[in-house]
Amino acid sequence: MPGKGMTCKCPHHRMIPWIVILIGLDFLLGATMVLTWTFVDITWPILLIIAGIVKLVRCSCCSK
């Protein structure tokens, strides 16, 4: 794991923030009626499941 002030370059460490942004965007577009609430109700749990799977999978940088 990188030291203080250093960031890891692994793609899975950048994926979680993107999924959080997508969930927020999903709800925002649902609230503004750009997307239907049925679509929002289906997509946000899928995004959370993907985030959980990514969090469970660790690369060699995490085990150091």
Image (cartoon, helix red, strand yellow):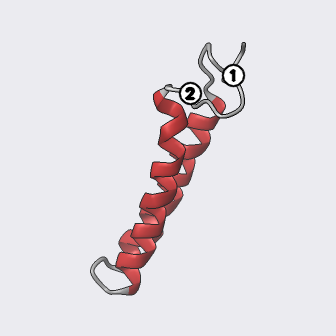
From the viewer's side, name the closer residue of 24 and 4.
4
At which x and y percent is residue 59? Answer: 59, 18
> In this figure, which residue is indicated by the disc labeled 1?
1
Neighbourhood count class around disc 2 (C-alpha, 10 Å): few under 14, some 14–19, many 20 upward? few
Which of the two discs, 2 and 1, labels the residue nearer the N terminus?
1
Tag 2 secondary structure: loop
**For the residue marked with disc 2, what is the amino acid?**
Cys
Tag 1 secondary structure: loop
> Which image quadrant for residue 5?
top right
Q: Residue at x 35, y 77 (%)?
A: 29
Above or below residue 26? Residue 52 is: above
> In this figure, which residue is indicated by the disc labeled 2?
8
Q: Are marks 2 and 1 in contact (CB under 8 Å)?
A: yes
Q: Residue at x 46, y 30 (%)?
A: 11
From the viewer's side, name the closer residue of 42 and 16.
16
Q: Residue at x 55, y 35 (%)?
A: 13
At which x and y percent is residue 22? Answer: 42, 59
**Residue 37 visible somewhere in the drawing:** no
Quadrant that contains the C terminus: top right
Residue found at the very far front of the displayed protein: 5
